[in-house]
Image: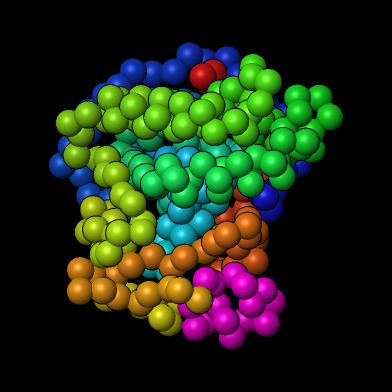
Amino acid sequence: MPDNANNSPITTHVQPTGNAKHTGHSPIATPDETYPSLSNALGGEQAAAEKLKVFIIGLPRTGTTSVSVALLEQGLNVAHMAFTKQAFMLADAISDVPCFSDYRQLDGLFPQAKFVYLERDLAKWVPSMQMLLGKMLPHLEAKSGRFHPIMKRSFRHTFAIDKVMHPVDEAHLIDCYQRHQHEVFAYFHGREDFISLDISHAGSLSRLLQFLGLATNGPTLGQMTDRAHSNTQINSTLIHQDRVNTSEHGLDFPKLNAGTHVAAWHEYKHPNKVNSNSAGPQSRKFFDYTL
């Protein structure tokens, strides 16, 4: 379940941009110049144009929380879900809603961004997604649901929850997963600013850090999970006991939100976490685009 779900108003007007290719740039650094298209979209807010971005565009229950926590520990400012322009401005990396549904639009707004798709074995993803949607569906209802409009829009767009009789049906979810994957792979085909990972594979964190140009000599996953265990504000079930620190292939991700747990991001305390509803010069305004 999300840790931010207030129903702030949103505005949607501008059509999405096309699929431009970006190569040869380094991540998490300040470019030499700002980008007019991004500046205009942000209403003159230059801070976002001066920071490169990482978008985690895997579907829910593919490891977005684990990736987000791992990037926090590498010193990045991270938003797990972002519902305002300001959240996008403050964060170096953004995951989950609305990234998995809005990657084309975000690609146009942030031309130097890197995109990380997360894969997961369907035999594991489907029951996990059924569990999540079972908890979320009452709050995704268009009029009475308490979740943020951006979240409702992302789930409607990707999972067609307002168009099918049984949104948690196995065949429907498999179709949603495969359609999303096909569209992502087709959109980013041949691009150097895109990577696909399965976080259960050995050394997957090392692959991500290498892709982002980040050093792999930061805190180990053992240090990360030990610190989490020592924080009395965190539920003892937050970190799955079957975690690994390193493998012969490199660093591995922590295993968070395992089983039926869905609140790991909210429970994990870190100074680099970015509030999904951060307010800025334009209050809590979102970008002006449509899907």
Image location (x, y in percent) of residue 281: 63, 40
The colour scheme is rainbow
The residue depicted at 36 percent of the width and 56 percent of the height is 199
> Which is nearer the eye, 86 or 164?
164
The residue depicted at 20 percent of the width and 68 percent of the height is 249
Residue 119 seen anywhere in this rendered image of the structure: yes
Residue 22's quadrant in the figure?
top left
Image location (x, y in percent) of residue 45: 51, 37
The residue depicted at 38 percent of the width and 65 percent of the height is 253
Is 188 rendered above or below residue 74?
above
Q: Is residue 230 magenta?
A: yes
The residue depicted at 46 percent of the width and 53 percent of the height is 63
Q: Is residue 138 magenta?
A: no
> Which is nearer the eye, 98 or 91?
98
Q: Name the magenta segment's main secondary structure.
A: loop
Image location (x, y in percent) of residue 184: 35, 30
Left or right of 278 in this view: 110: left
> Which is nearer the eye, 158 or 36?
158
Q: Residue furthest right?
A: 144
Residue 102 seen anywhere in this rendered image of the structure: no
Is 107 rendered above or below residue 115?
above
Image location (x, y in percent) of residue 153: 62, 27
The segment highlighted magenta reads 225-240
